[in-house]
């Protein structure tokens, strides 16, 4: 991320920085709802900007007052990291030079065991490079190179000491999250690791060249148990790539001549020197540099694709605010009159016996109750007009009732039904037809209570029915609640008293 | 269709029109809901948006009340004026002098005549009555595509087939079950899918809406799981110290710990409710049953050792070993040695800073109370059940979710390794004064995944019932 910025990379860097800022803002706002709500202008700007929800969240983060201090802290933390990396690179280079010096130093000051020197210069590098490659192939939570991780860890330890600045802590948390997240973090650490190794090997290379320029060495090899063929093949192997590139490397004769102790005078030291330098360059510095380029590109690519995790709970609210799912609710037509239902309290007093005359029974908008229809206890005393709904049924019932003045009209309705204006209108017509001698029986209380869920709602429903009765000019004395779904014996007595004198 | 498509939500009074608006908009305070008839006395718009862009207009309307009377009234008008149905309906809707006590219905009709699609809400617990047949006849005359919505379908399905038959008779074959109180994602998707087939130009906006809905639901599950995971980690790692053998102090620290955990649970519940866009009134939790364990830092506790061991390994892995090898190969000051000394010392300091206090505390005879597994267990179960309930709750629902104490089964076993680790990580709990760690976030991610699965399973179970 701190690598060279190409022109095309600028926009990408902007995106990466924006996401980092959004993350830092999220951390800052977590558990700080006041800050989350004081963002009116930022929200408006974000909404106006269009784009995806992520874009808008980034936009919002940029628009908040916290953006300035957070960006300042992000930049400062980056600068510290950059400085630390430079420092580590210098240290690595010096360490490489020191290693090279050690490798080319022997007791007598002139003879150097060539293969021993190669091993100390390239051995560890080769081993760790191989391990890194193997770990790449093995799916695991591999770290992307220990040196890179250590560098980030050192950086963190260094900056974490700063306390009391919540912006810095939020920026740090966000950056750590980005560094330790998935494959992007791994490639980033990898490029750091390779960079340090490249510096180490480059330092070694420079030192080797300097020593070879200013001192005279005699390269030798020695063995107790191996034969000359092994060393010849080893030299050929090492020299294959350099000689393909035109570097002169030791041939079999040179290998034979360099065996210790032997006739060292005949050996040509330049071929050994050029092999040493070429090996360092071709097997050391260049592969590491290539790895730096590849991992850095991969890291950049991954960071470009690493979107904000909008399923983080603390993004939910800003996300909804920058991309609301409901953009407006408003009353577009209507009167200011308050809702005008009438309610009344049902008095649980007994209804008076019917007047002389026929007693009619009519069910309005009800299904057959569980105790059957007509209700138990009415059979011998009433004239059953059946159950009905709709204009035609109502008219038929009214015609019958009108024919003779009734002693009573018992109308059964269901408490589960909402007492709407249609009900009121029907009750009013029935009451008129019955010369006011209408008694309203409200059934289905148990089922209604179950349906309404709460006791308060159930009481509302009872009051609404009483209100509907009143609106139809039925006196509350002439309303009663009897559950016809109850066992017949229970209901019979109650109903009988309504229909007999 | 350049203008935003308009959908009118209509139906008899008190069947759940406003409830449907609430559930579709996730706005639990949209309009007014009550058991009274004629609660809604205006037309109210809700503008649905995808990525902040308006995509659909939903209109809540006053319900029909005296539908039979209304039909008769308009029929009379038509006969008087000698017009066709649509003309008479338009005249009735727009001219106040023709309303004749049906002003609420006129308001609804006016909206109906301006809409592209009608959602006709039915309370499927009710039998089909003449008033409904009259409403359907009237709707047929408006020449608008109608999608019937069978509400309260999960409560009592007694009359569903009767309704379907009646609706088919008036050529309404596409019917959606949609309970405004018991939410089911698939029902909402079905609603929009079927709606899209009813009018031109609805397909594109509605598929976007469906897409957004799916994404949002998935994010909701994940976010809920993360909130629960954070709660568990905070509680598992919470601890209060007291001097060994000081029973009074121990009791008061335990009580303090319980308070902290209760408060923390309340916070998590609030966050969950807010995330799902519900409010306090939507949840009536039972008291959290409590048990707390006592934890004394034992230096020779295998887990403590492992903790030290773990860090030693890491320190080695991060450079010390490399340095050793380089030294072996080359001797002298090498990069490896530099890294090893730097990193090794760094890690050692880190370890001492982290655990040193505990070690000192142990030596000085400090012990700590922590929350035990049983409590963690019931916290987990409660929050999973709550989340599943929230996922299955329509925003019209009036009755609160009752918090029950249940068992979480083998989910807890799956989380146990991470939670056990959390017990040793004082830094992971915001209830202690937490330090900045990235390992806490990793632990939260680790347990959030099985929690998310459990939430989905729990949700499936309740949907099947
Ligand atoms: N059983 C039950 N009924 C509910 C719940 N929420 C709302 N209702 C009822 O659903 C009915 C419909 O209300 P509303 O949406 O205002 O109907 P609208 O007149 O068509 O707008 C009312 O009787 C409410 O009491 C609930 O959670 N459970
Ligand atoms: Mg309403």
Image: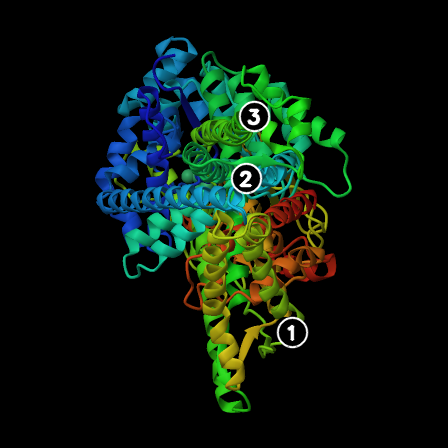
Circle 1 — which element?
Answer: loop
Mark 1 burial class by Cα count in 10 Å: few <14, some 14-19, many 20+: few
Residue closer to the observer: A101 or A374 = A101
User: Residues at marks 2 and 1, common chain?
Assistant: no
User: Residues at marks 1 and 3, common chain?
Assistant: no
Reading the image, the residue beneath label 2 is A121
Q: Residue A35 at x, y = what percent?
A: 28, 51
Eyeballing the image, is B90 above or below A191?
above
- Figure quadrant of residue B369: bottom right
Circle 3 — which element?
Answer: loop
Given this view, does label 1 or label 3 mark the residue nearer the observer?
A: 3
Residue closer to the observer: B175 or A156 = A156
Residue closer to the observer: B380 or A457 = B380
Q: CA distance from mark 2 to mark 1?
A: 44 Å
Disc 1: host chain? B
Tag of residue A268: 3
Q: CA distance from mark 2 to mark 3?
A: 22 Å
Q: CA distance from mark 1 to mark 3?
A: 65 Å
Residue A195 relative to residue A49: left or right: right
Disc 2: host chain? A
Eyeballing the image, is B450 above or below A228?
below
Reading the image, the residue beneath label 1 is B301
Eyeballing the image, is A493 above or below B301?
above
Circle 2 — which element?
Answer: helix
Quadrant for the N terminus of chain A in the image:
top left
Residue A492 relative to residue B438: left or right: right
User: Residues at marks 2 and 3, common chain?
Assistant: yes
């Amino acid at each position: 991320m701190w690598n060279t910025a190409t022109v095309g990379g600028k926009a990408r860097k902007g995106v990466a920085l924006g996401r980092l800022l959004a993350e830092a803002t999220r951390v800052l706002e977590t558990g700080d709802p006041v800050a989350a709500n004081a963002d009116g202008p930022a929200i408006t700007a974000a909404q106006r900007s269009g784009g995806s929800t992520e874009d808008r969240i980034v936009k919002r983060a940029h628009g908040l007052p916290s953006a300035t201090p957070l960006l300042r802290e992000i930049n400062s933390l980056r600068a510290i990291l950059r400085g630390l990396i430079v420092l580590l690179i210098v240290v690595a280079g010096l360490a490489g030079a020191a290693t090279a010096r050690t490798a080319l130093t022997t007791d007598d000051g002139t003879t150097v065991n060539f293969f021993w020197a190669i091993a100390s210069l390239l051995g560890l590098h080769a081993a760790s490079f191989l391990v890194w490659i193997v770990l790449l192939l093995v799916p695991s939570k591999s770290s992307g190179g220990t040196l890179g991780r250590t560098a980030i860890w050192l950086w963190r330890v260094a900056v974490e000491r700063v306390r009391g600045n919540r912006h810095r802590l939020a920026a740090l948390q966000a950056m750590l999250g980005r560094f330790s997240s998935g494959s992007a973090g791994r490639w980033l650490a990898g490029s750091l690791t390779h960079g340090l190794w490249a510096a180490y090997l480059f330092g070694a290379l420079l030192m080797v060249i300097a020593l070879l320029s200013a001192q005279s060495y005699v390269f030798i090899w020695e063995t107790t148990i191996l034969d000359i063929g092994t060393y010849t093949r080893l030299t050929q192997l090492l020299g294959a790539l350099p000689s393909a590139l035109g570097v002169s490397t030791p041939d079999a004769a040179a290998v034979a001549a360099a065996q210790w102790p032997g006739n060292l005078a005949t050996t040509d030291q330049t071929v050994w020197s050029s092999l040493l330098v070429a090996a360092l360059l071709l097997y050391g510095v260049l592969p590491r540099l290539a790895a730096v380029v590849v991992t850095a590109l991969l890291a950049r690519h991954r960071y470009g694709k690493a979107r904000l995790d909008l399923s983080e709970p603390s993004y939910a609210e800003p996300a909804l605010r920058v991309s609301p799912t409901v953009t407006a609710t408003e009353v577009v037509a209507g009167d200011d009159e308050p809702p005008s239902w009438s309610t009344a309290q049902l008095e649980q007093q007994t209804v008076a016996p019917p007047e002389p005359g026929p007693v009619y029974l009519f069910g309005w908008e009800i299904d057959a109750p569980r105790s059957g229809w007509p209700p138990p206890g009415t059979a011998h005393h009433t004239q059953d007009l059946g159950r009905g709904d709709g204009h035609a049924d109502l008219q038929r019932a009214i015609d019958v009732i009108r024919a003779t003045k009734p002693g009573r009209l018992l109308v059964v309705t269901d408490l589960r039904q909402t007492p709407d204006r249609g009900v009121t209108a029907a009750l009013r017509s029935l009451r008129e037809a019955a010369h006011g001698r209408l008694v309203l029986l409200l059934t289905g209380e148990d089922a209604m209570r179950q349906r309404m869920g709460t006791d308060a709602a159930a009481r509302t429903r009872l009051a609404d029915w009483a209100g509907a009765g009143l609106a139809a000019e039925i006196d509350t004395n002439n309303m009663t609640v009897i559950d016809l779904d109850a066992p017949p014996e229970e209901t019979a007595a109650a109903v009988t008293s309504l229909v007999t004198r | 269709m350049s203008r935003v498509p308009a959908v009118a939500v209509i139906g008899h009074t008190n069947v759940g029109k406003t409830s449907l608006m609430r559930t579709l908009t996730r706005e639990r305070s949209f309009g007014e809901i009550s058991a009274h008839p004629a609660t809604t006395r205006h037309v109210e718009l809700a503008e649905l948006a995808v990525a902040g862009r308006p995509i659909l207009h939903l209109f809540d309307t006053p319900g029909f009340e005296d539908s039979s009377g209304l039909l008769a009234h308009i029929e009379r008008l038509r006969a008087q004026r000698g017009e066709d149905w649509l003309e008479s309906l338009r005249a009735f809707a727009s001219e106040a002098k023709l309303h004749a006590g049906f002003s609420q219905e006129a308001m609804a009709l006016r909206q109906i005549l301006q809409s592209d699609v009608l959602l006709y809400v039915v309370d499927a617990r009710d039998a089909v009555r003449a008033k409904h047949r009259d409403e359907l006849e009237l709707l047929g005359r408006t020449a608008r595509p109608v999608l019937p919505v069978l509400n309260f379908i999960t409560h009592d399905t007694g009359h569903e087939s009767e309704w379907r038959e009646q609706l088919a008779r008036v050529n309404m074959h596409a019917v959606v079950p949609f309970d405004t109180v018991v939410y089911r994602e698939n029902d909402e998707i079905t609603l929009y899918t079927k709606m899209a087939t009813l009018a031109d130009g609805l397909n594109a906006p509605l598929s976007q809406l469906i897409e957004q809905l799916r994404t949002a639901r998935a994010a909701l599950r994940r976010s809920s799981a993360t909130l629960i995971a954070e709660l568990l980690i905070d509680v598992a790692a919470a601890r209060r110290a007291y001097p060994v053998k000081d029973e009074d102090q121990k009791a008061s620290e335990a009580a303090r710990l319980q308070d902290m955990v209760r408060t923390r649970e309340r916070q998590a519940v609030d966050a969950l409710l807010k995330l799902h866009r519900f409010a306090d009134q939507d949840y009536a939790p039972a008291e959290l049953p409590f048990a707390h364990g006592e934890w004394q830092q034992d230096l020779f506790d295998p887990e403590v050792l492992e903790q030290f061991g773990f860090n030693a390994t890491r320190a080695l892995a991060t450079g010390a070993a490399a340095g050793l090898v380089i030294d072996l190969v080359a001797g002298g000051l090498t990069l490896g040695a530099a890294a090893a000394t730097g990193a090794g010392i760094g890690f050692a300091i880190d370890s001492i800073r982290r655990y040193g206090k505990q070690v000192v505390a142990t030596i000085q005879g400090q012990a700590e109370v922590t929350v035990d597994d049983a409590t963690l267990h019931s916290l987990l179960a409660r929050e999973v059940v709550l989340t599943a309930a929230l996922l299955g709750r329509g925003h019209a629902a009036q009755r609160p979710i009752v918090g029950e104490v249940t068992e979480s089964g083998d989910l807890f076993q799956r989380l146990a390794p991470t939670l056990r680790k959390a017990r040793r990580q004082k830094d992971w709990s915001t209830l202690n004064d937490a330090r900045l760690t990235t390992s806490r976030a990793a632990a939260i991610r680790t347990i959030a995944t099985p929690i998310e699965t459990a939430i989905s399973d729990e949700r499936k179970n309740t949907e099947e019932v």
